[in-house]
Amino acid sequence: MNRYDKMVELNRLLSKEKERRAINALIEMKEEGWISVTELTRRTGLSRTYFYKNPEVRKKLDEALRECKNTGLSNHRAVLENGVLQAKLKLLEKEAEKLRAKNRSLEKENENLKLAMEQLEIEMLHML
């Protein structure tokens, strides 16, 4: 094998290794329930372009994105937004419970004031 053939073989092996890394990262992210090309580039060290231009990787990426969409899995941003919304919902539920308790207290106070007012009216009528 001459030098050129060795270089070609080395490049082919490096390409296969990149492809393997990309597909493994896709599989991991799919298992986590979200797919993000930005996160794929961070995990693999490969460029965004690589994920779109490599035919085999692009095919796997499209399949993974389609599968996530079909199974109700979402992208990372949506997962984060959902977490934020859940936290806001809990805070709002706590606030609503506090307001319901305050309302009950005010209703009780209002009822007591009505009774006190009725008693004062009765006392005033007796004075006349």
Image (spheres, rainbow, N blue to C red):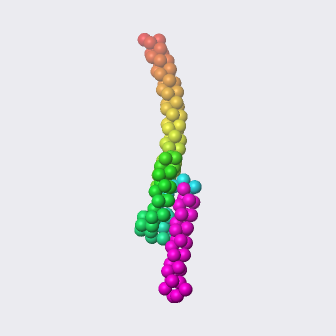
In this orientation, which residue lies closer to the viewer: 71 or 98?
A: 71
- Quadrant holding the C terminus: top left
In this orientation, which residue lies closer to the viewer: 8 or 105?
A: 8
Residue 117 is one of the magenta-drawn residues:
no
In this orientation, which residue lies closer to the viewer: 114 or 28?
A: 28
Which residue corresponds to the image point at 47% horizontal and 12% vertical from the top-left?
126
Q: Residue lying at the far bottom in this picture: please name it.
A: 3
Which residue corresponds to the image point at 49% horizontal and 55% vertical from the top-left?
63
Position of 28 relative to 102 (above/below):
below
- Quadrant holding the N terminus: bottom right
Residue 2 is one of the magenta-drawn residues:
yes
- Can residue 63 be seen in the rendering of this structure? yes
On the image, the x and y values in percent for residue 11 come to: 50, 78
In this orientation, which residue lies closer to the viewer: 28 or 85?
A: 28
- Can residue 48 be seen in the rendering of this structure? no
Position of 44 relative to 87 (above/below):
below
Position of 82 relative to 42 (above/below):
above
Q: Residue lying at the far front in this picture: please name it.
A: 1
**Magenta-colored span:** 1-30
In the picture, measured across the screen, residue 5 lies left or right of residue 53, that is right
Which residue corresponds to the image point at 56% horizontal and 64% vertical from the top-left?
24
On the image, the x and y values in percent for residue 120 come to: 47, 19
